[in-house]
Image (cartoon, rainbow, N blue to C red):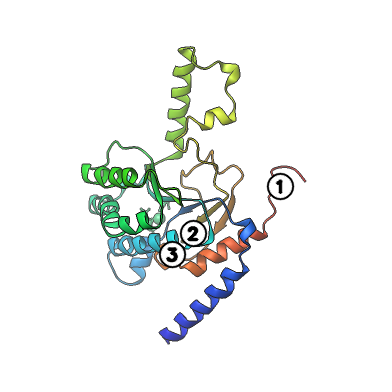
């Protein structure tokens, strides 16, 4: 039974990948990786087993994104609101970057991937920061896929801090109020010079943004799937890309 499903999956992958147009691959894909806890619950496992399994999906989707020519992959890994979860779960989540990078950093380097991080350093344990800093530093000159982790990230906090920093610059005379436009304000956000996402994927069936990139998603195509993140396969990902390619982006025009 399993082989049959696997075989079908493989076949589907080939046909789906060939249905993806190389000319309309989204430049920047952002993913709200949701459903780890429910994935585990369905199997009678502790929630952290879902997070562990979710880590494998991160690798899988990074490779898939790179394969089809996505240039930036932003992954929402921990929100500023996720601190309200039980201590044990938060502790486990904080250990994941280190675990992930220990296993995968060499391969990411081989694949010319550049690791970046957005979010706040405050509150993150030292070992998490060290692992992230090492990955960012060792991949900073890579020119391939940008793998951007949003960790301890929250969009409202990001916008508020951006507003405060721009106000300070206005008061100091470094920026004139008349100069401040959307492009300049974007440069005060954590995403700085990164272009806005073209496609946002959220797994697990929830259809909300949960404080993720509210400014940057203004004209992003949204794709929601019921699939839990640990189950999210290359085929699921290609399906999302294919759907994106059928969308017509109007930006308010005709
Ligand atoms: C996403 O899965 C991972 C994080 C938010 C860190 P969840 O842990 O939110 O899983 P569900 O939504 O409870 O199933
Ligand atoms: C969003 O998922 C945050 C991440 C995936 C990191 P949540 O599971 O925290 O979102 P809500 O609470 O269902 O909105
Ligand atoms: Mg969730």
State left or right for residue 126 relative to residue 32. left
Q: Which residue is mark 2?
A: 65
Q: Residue 215 vs residue 84: left or right?
A: right
Q: Position of residue 105 (x, y in %)?
A: 31, 55
- Quick one: label 2 or label 3, which is nearer the N terminus? 2
Q: Is residue 175 above or below residue 124?
A: above
From the top left corner, tell me how far across and down residue 81 is, in percent: 37, 44
- Name the mark on residue 228: 3
Of circles 3 and 1, the one toward us is: 1
**179 sits to left or right of 144:** right
Q: What residue does disc 1 label?
A: 250
User: Who is closer to the viewer here, 165 or 24?
Assistant: 24
> What's the residue at 42%, 40% (across, down)?
154
The mark closer to the camera, 1 or 2, is 2
Looking at the image, which residue is at 61% across and 65% down?
Answer: 20
Calculate the distance from the C-alpha at mark 1 to the C-alpha at mark 2.
25 Å
Mark identifier at residue 72: none
Most extreme residue toward the right is 254
Label 1: element kind: loop
Foreground label between 2 and 3: 2
Label 3 lies in ligand 1 vicinity (Cβ under 8 Å)? yes
Spatial CA span between label 3 and label 1: 30 Å
Question: For the point 51% across and 64% down, which residue is it?
Answer: 237
Say few, some or many: other residues with alpha carbon within 10 Å of mark 2 (under 14 / 14 to 19 / 20 or more).
many
Sequence-wise, the earlier of marks 3 and 1 is: 3
Which of the 4 image quarters holds residue 21? bottom right
Q: Quadrant of residue 180?
A: top right
Question: How far across and down, in percent of the image, does residue 13 sit?
Answer: 53, 73
User: Residue at the spot x=47%, y=33% of the render?
Assistant: 189
Mark 3 Cα within 10 Å, few/some/many (few <14, many 20+)? many
């Amino acid at each position: 039974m399993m082989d049959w499903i696997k075989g079908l999956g493989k076949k589907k992958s080939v046909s789906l990948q060939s249905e993806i147009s190389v000319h309309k691959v989204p430049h920047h894909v952002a993913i709200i990786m949701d459903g780890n806890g429910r994935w585990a619950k369905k199997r009678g496992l502790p929630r952290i087993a879902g997070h562990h399994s979710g880590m494998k999906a991160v690798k899988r989707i990074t490779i898939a994104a790179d394969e089809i020519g996505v240039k930036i992959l932003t992954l929402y890994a921990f929100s500023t609101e996720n601190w309200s979860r039980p201590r044990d779960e938060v502790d486990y989540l904080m250990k994941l970057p280190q675990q992930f990078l220990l296993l995968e950093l060499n391969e990411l380097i081989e694949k010319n991937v550049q690791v970046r991080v957005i979010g706040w350093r405050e509150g993150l344990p030292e070992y998490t920061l060290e692992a992230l800093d090492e990955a960012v530093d060792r991949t900073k000159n890579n020119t391939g896929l940008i793998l951007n982790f949003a960790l301890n990230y929250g969009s409202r906090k990001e916008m508020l801090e951006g507003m405060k920093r721009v106000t300070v610059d206005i008061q100091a005379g470094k920026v004139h109020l008349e100069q401040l436009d959307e492009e300049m304000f974007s440069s005060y956000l954590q995403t700085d010079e990164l272009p806005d996402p073209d496609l946002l994927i959220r797994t697990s069936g929830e259809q909300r943004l949960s404080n993720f990139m509210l400014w940057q998603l203004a004209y992003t195509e949204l794709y929601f799937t019921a699939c839990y993140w640990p189950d999210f396969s290359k085929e699921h990902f290609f399906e999302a890309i294919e759907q994106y390619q059928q969308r017509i982006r109007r930006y308010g025009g005709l």
